[in-house]
């Protein structure tokens, strides 16, 4: 039986990797395909593995195209888009109202949407009353096995460059105390600001292939469910060039959809939670 998560063979996916239009060609809806698969009940383990392999090859081909487009982005346009996206976040009611959040610390080497202004806004607000400040958690990669923690920081000075050239918190703070891990915090976060390489308007997100974010999101969502906390809003920041046609990003069962995108032209709400907040 053919599991229709994606139709291109691995050879096609690799061959397609040379042109944006070819790689961005529409594929059948992965969501309906997964539903078909789970009800059919007749799949073999080896055909599952083969289809997953095809999907990972398609993701790899798409990553190459988007990386190339990001590399050739005009620097003036990039900084205009960085400014616009950060301004939209800083002015959004869901950002203003949030009390705690996890955000990535942008890397210029990876050509990610800049988060510098957002993070410094958080870390310098309410100097007279630190209790009023939003509580900020940022990623720290622990190993190559998809383990990433989100640790609390109170200053940009808490960050040091990792081997991947990304600023991350050390596990201990300046006083030698363990930093708080969001998975062990007593209070929920309301917002997750997510990076990625490509996104679509149905909430699909293509990461860098480490599985760090999908694993973390799945752990956090499970924790929120156990504790009866409201699920945090998952918002991805995206340059215009990173938004691809629906159906272009292949999904595996582990991929978690985002609630909304922030692009230079505004917030694109996707889930019902995001639609409620935006209207
Ligand atoms: N700013 C930021 N922090 C983050 C992430 C992220 O995507 N952005 N992560 C999200 O997972 C985790 C780190 N994961 C990473 C995964 C890949 C690469 C990276 O350098 N990838 C290269 C390609 C490497 C290769 O394929 O050999 C690249 O994308 O160009 C960096 C970080 C945690 N922290
Ligand atoms: N929740 C999870 N549990 C187990 N394995 C997972 C989970 N999420 C992702 N993975 C695995 O991580 C690897 C990378 O997956 P994928 O290529 O989809 O990563 P990505 O979505 O690009 O990365 P990220 O999640 O960091 O943004 C795959 O082998 C995938 O099966």
Image (cartoon, rainbow, N blue to C red):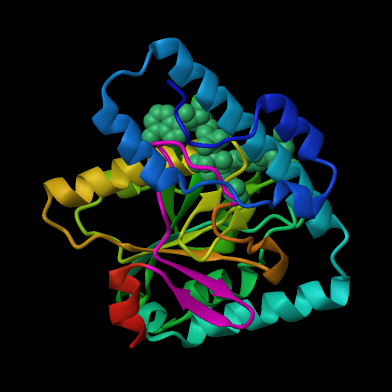
Image check: 75 left or right of 271?
right
Q: Is residue 18 magenta?
A: no
- Is residue 113 at least partly visible in the picture? yes
Instruction: Name the foreground residue: 124 vs 49.
Output: 49
Which residue does the image show at 40% across and 40% down from the upper left? 33
Q: Position of residue 157 (x, y in %)?
A: 59, 58
> Does 131 appear above or below 221?
below
Instruction: Name the foreground residue: 265 vs 147.
Output: 265
Image check: 13 left or right of 15?
left
The magenta region covers 248-270
Report the residue that reaches farthest toward the front. Answer: 1
Q: Is residue 261 magenta?
A: yes
- Is residue 169 at least partly visible in the picture? no
- Quarter containing ligand 1? top right
Which residue does the image show at 41% across and 78% down from the upper left? 95
> Does 169 appear above or below 252?
below
Which residue does the image show at 79% across and 40% down from the upper left? 17
Q: Position of residue 201 (x, y in %)?
A: 51, 66
Which residue does the image show at 37% across and 72% down from the upper left? 134
Name the main secondary structure of what is drawn in magenta. loop
């Amino acid at each position: 039986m053919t599991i229709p998560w994606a139709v291109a063979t691995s050879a096609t996916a690799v061959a397609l990797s040379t042109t944006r239009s070819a790689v961005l060609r529409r594929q059948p809806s992965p969501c309906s395909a997964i539903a078909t698969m789970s009800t059919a009940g007749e799949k073999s383990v080896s055909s599952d593995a083969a289809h997953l392999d095809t999907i990972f090859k398609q993701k790899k081909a798409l990553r190459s195209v988007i990386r190339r487009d990001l590399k050739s982005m005009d620097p003036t346009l990039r900084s205009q888009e960085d400014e616009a996206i950060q301004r939209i976040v800083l002015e959004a009611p869901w950002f203003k109202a949030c009390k705690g959040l996890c955000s990535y610390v942008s890397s210029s080497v990876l050509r990610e949407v800049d988060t510098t202004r957002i993070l410094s806004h958080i870390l310098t607000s309410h100097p007279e009353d630190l209790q009023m400040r939003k509580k900020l958690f940022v990623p720290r990669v622990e190993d190559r096995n998809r383990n990433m923690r989100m640790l609390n920081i109170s200053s940009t000075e808490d960050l040091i460059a990792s081997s991947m050239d990304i600023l991350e918190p050390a596990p201990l703070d300046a006083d030698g105390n363990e930093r708080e891990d969001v998975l062990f915090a007593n209070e929920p976060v309301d917002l997750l600001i997510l990076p990625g390489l490509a996104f679509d308007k149905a909430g699909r997100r293509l990461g860098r292939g480490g599985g760090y974010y999908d694993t973390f999101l799945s752990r956090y969502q499970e924790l929120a469910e156990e504790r009866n906390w409201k699920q945090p809003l998952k918002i991805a920041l995206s340059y215009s060039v990173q938004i691809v046609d629906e159906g272009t990003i292949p999904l595996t069962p582990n991929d978690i959809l985002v609630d909304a995108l922030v692009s230079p032209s505004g917030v694109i709400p996707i889930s019902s939670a995001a639609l409620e907040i935006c209207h």
